[in-house]
Image: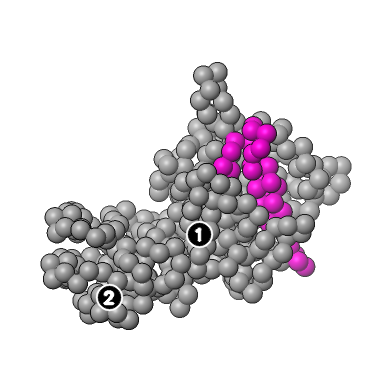
Amino acid sequence: MMNLNTVSINTALPGKSRARILIIYTGGTFGMTYDREGVLVPFNFPYILEQLPTLKNLALEITAVSFENPIDSSNVNIEHWRLIGSIIRDQYANHDGFVVLHGTDTMAYTASALSFMLEGLSKPVVFTGAQLPISEPRSDARENLITALEVASARQEGIPLVPEVCIYFDYALLRGNRSKKVESMQFDAFDSGNYPPLAKAGVKIDYNFSVIRSTPRSTSLELRDTFETNVAILKLFPGINRQVVNAILTIPGLKAVVVETYGSGNAPTLPWLIEELQVAIEQGIILLNISQCPGGRVLQGRYETSKRLQQIGVISGADMTTEAAVSKLMLLIGQFGPERTRELIGLSLAGELTS
């Protein structure tokens, strides 16, 4: 397991803290600083705390766990998902909420994966990060972290207000497995086109309780972390040829493919394309239909261009994001195998799709 550095700070002293929060710092732009050559490099989390004297006003007991070698989120892999999940599981009873500082590039993938991994979650897990390093004067890191901590510690009569995995960015709290990164240059980096924000942060944090998941009856947490990584994405485009499709569908050991289609789940009616997809399905490969559109949903059979997909056994992904679809497929196949996955993939397991 990767080495971790741990720092504790009680911002409530000499008074009593409102909550105990665990921050998991993985890396990313949030905690970057410039070296002598002007290149952005990560620095240790204790220095980030020095950038935020307003933490003292939150009255929280904070434990910050950071990767010994913080990573750019482009390098995030399954082992990092497992590590984040195991930290939350091991510290679950000792903390009221969790904040994960993560690079923005793959944050939606990690948040989606954690939503499926943390079975029975009844406490907030809030992902956040920044588009500018916290050392920058105009950085969005400070507000993002402060509000993420507020959300992670928010309770009413001892019950967490947001008992799910979410992403907080640029004044919006979004469901993690509904989110996509949509901006690389603006502060509003994330959107959840098919699901309304869980909260908006203005003068106060305005929670939309009608769309927040209810607290599960069971308070025990189970970590599911067995993944099958033989999963691929096939994105359709005008002019796609048989060789490209065949090369993806005949990958040795392939278990599932997310087929990114047009509009409401439509694909070209080319006979060779249908044949290639049908052969893959007959060989036991799961094909999941996900729309390329950031909003809307797959409606297989609505148009002739999707009816054949439905007939040959392509599974509708409804309004799932590609990020949620990929992580969900990998986890379900890893945990339960292909047959059970076919039964579960179209069901909402963590609020990731609208039935």
284 or 127: which is nearer to us? 127
Mark 1 to mark 2 CA distance (whole Å): 25 Å
Residue 92 to residue 24: above or below = below
The reply, left or right, for residue 129 in relation to residue 184 is right
Q: Residue at x 76, y 59 (%)?
A: 204
Q: Position of residue 291 (x, y in %)?
A: 36, 66
Magenta-drawn stretch contains 327: no
Residue where numbered disc 2 is placed? 306
Query: Which disc, if any, is residue 69?
Result: none
Q: Nearer the viewer, mark 1 or mark 2?
A: 2
Find residue 279 and report its image quarter: bottom left
Q: Is residue 193 visible?
A: yes
Q: Residues within 10 Å of mark 2 (few under 14, many from 20)?
A: many
> Residue at the right extreme?
14
The amino acid at mark 1 is Ser
Q: Position of residue 231 (x, y in %)?
A: 29, 57
Q: Residue at x 57, y 32 (%)?
A: 32
Find residue 343 and report its image quarter: bottom left
243 or 346: which is nearer to us? 243
> Residue at the front extreme?
238
Q: Position of residue 46 (x, y in %)?
A: 66, 32
Quadrant (top left, top right, bottom left, bottom right) of the C terminus: bottom left
Disc 1 on helix, strand or loop? loop
The reply, left or right, for residue 263 in relation to residue 149 is left
Q: The magenta stretch spans which residues? A: 129-158
Q: Are marks 1 and 2 in contact (CB under 8 Å)?
A: no
Residue where numbered disc 1 is placed? 179
